[in-house]
Image: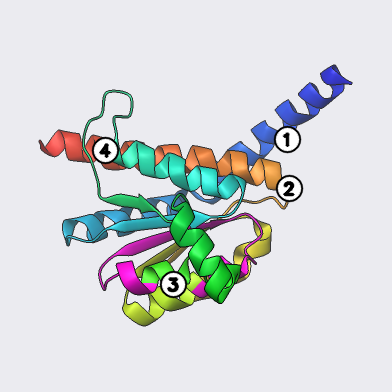
């Protein structure tokens, strides 16, 4: 059983990561460029998602705020997933669908940027946050899987991992996040 699962995951992971890097390279480049424009203009990055994608949001925040492989440039990145009092208050008072949008209404400003991480592309709380971001003039990016490809026309940048398998999409998202953060930090360090 173990060997069978190990081999399956190894093959699927390699196929999805390779396909993502080939098919999504231009969208990943656009994601980085949008972040550069945002940060150069004094904007901040807000990132969010559910479940494993919430962990990815925290990971992205940590890489941009902290040290990454000796790259010490820092960026104003904020996760909207790790504030228990705020999250439970909004969920109780307005419903979980509003958990990110209500935070953006208060915290987000024109010229900021959001990255919604949603493997399915259908998470209502992410979609509502995208609507709020659009209404406030916030730059919008999405990391998603095949189920979210319909978001391409609704956001500034949509990176669609060519898979509908949640685990493989999440693995590809981490690779995208690492590329995104490393390029931003290398460019900033080179300017210093």
**Which mark is in front, 3 or 2?**
3
How packed mark 3 is, by other alpha carbons closer than 10 Å (few <14, some 14-19, many 20 or more), is many
Q: Which callout, 3 or 1, points at the residue further toward the start of the chain?
A: 1
Q: Which of these two is toward me, 7 or 174?
A: 174
Q: Does 173 sit above or below residue 135?
A: above
Q: State the scheme by which the image is colored.
A: rainbow
Between the residue at mark 1 and the residue at mark 4, the CA separation in whole angstroms equals 30 Å
Please provide percent x and percent y for residue 81: 48, 53
Question: On the rendered image, what quadrant is the C terminus found in?
Answer: top left
* Left or right: 9 as drawn, with respect to 176: right
What residue sits right under mark 4 in the picture? 185
Residue 42: x and y in percent read 17, 60
N-terminal of the two: label 1 or label 4?
1
Residue 77, visible in the rendered structure: yes
The answer to which of marks 4 and 2 sits earlier in the sequence is 2
Nearer the viewer's eye, disc 4 or disc 3?
3
The secondary structure type at the circle numbered 3 is helix
Circle 3 or circle 1, nearest the eye: 3
Q: Nearer the viewer, residue 179 or 52?
A: 52
Q: How many badges with numbers are in the image?
A: 4
The residue at the far top in this view is 3
Q: Residue at x 82, y 26 (%)?
A: 5
What numbered label is drawn on residue 165? 2
How many neighbours does mark 4 have within 10 angstroms: few (below 14), some (14-19), or many (20 or more)?
Answer: many
- Residue designated by label 3: 102
Most extreme residue toward the bottom is 135
Residues tagged 2 and 1 counted as in contact (Cβ below 8 A):
yes
Residue 49, percent across and down? 54, 55
Q: Please tell me which residue is depicted at 37% across the width and 38% down the height of the picture.
A: 62
Read off the residue under disc 1: 12
**Residues shaded magenta:** 105-128
Could you tell me if residue 142 is visible in this image? no
């Amino acid at each position: 059983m173990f060997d069978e699962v190990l081999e399956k995951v190894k093959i699927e992971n390699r196929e999805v990561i390779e396909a993502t890097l080939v098919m999504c390279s231009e969208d990943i480049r656009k994601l980085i460029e949008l972040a550069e424009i945002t940060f150069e203009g004094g904007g901040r990055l807000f990132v969010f998602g559910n479940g494993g994608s919430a962990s990815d949001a925290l990971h992205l925040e940590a890489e941009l705020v902290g040290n990454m492989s000796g790259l010490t440039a820092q960026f104003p990145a904020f996760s909207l997933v790790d504030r228990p009092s705020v999250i439970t208050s909004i969920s109780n008072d307005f419903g979980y669908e509003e958990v990110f949008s209500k935070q953006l209404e208060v915290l987000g400003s024109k010229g900021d940027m959001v990255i919604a991480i949603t493997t399915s592309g259908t998470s209502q709380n992410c979609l509502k946050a995208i609507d709020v971001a659009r209404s406030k003039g916030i730059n919008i990016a999405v990391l998603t899987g095949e189920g979210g490809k319909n978001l391409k026309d609704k956001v500034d940048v949509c990176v669609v991992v060519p898979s509908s398998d949640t685990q493989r999409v999440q693995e590809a998202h981490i690779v995208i996040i690492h590329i995104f953060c490393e390029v931003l930090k290398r460019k900033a360090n080179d300017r210093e």
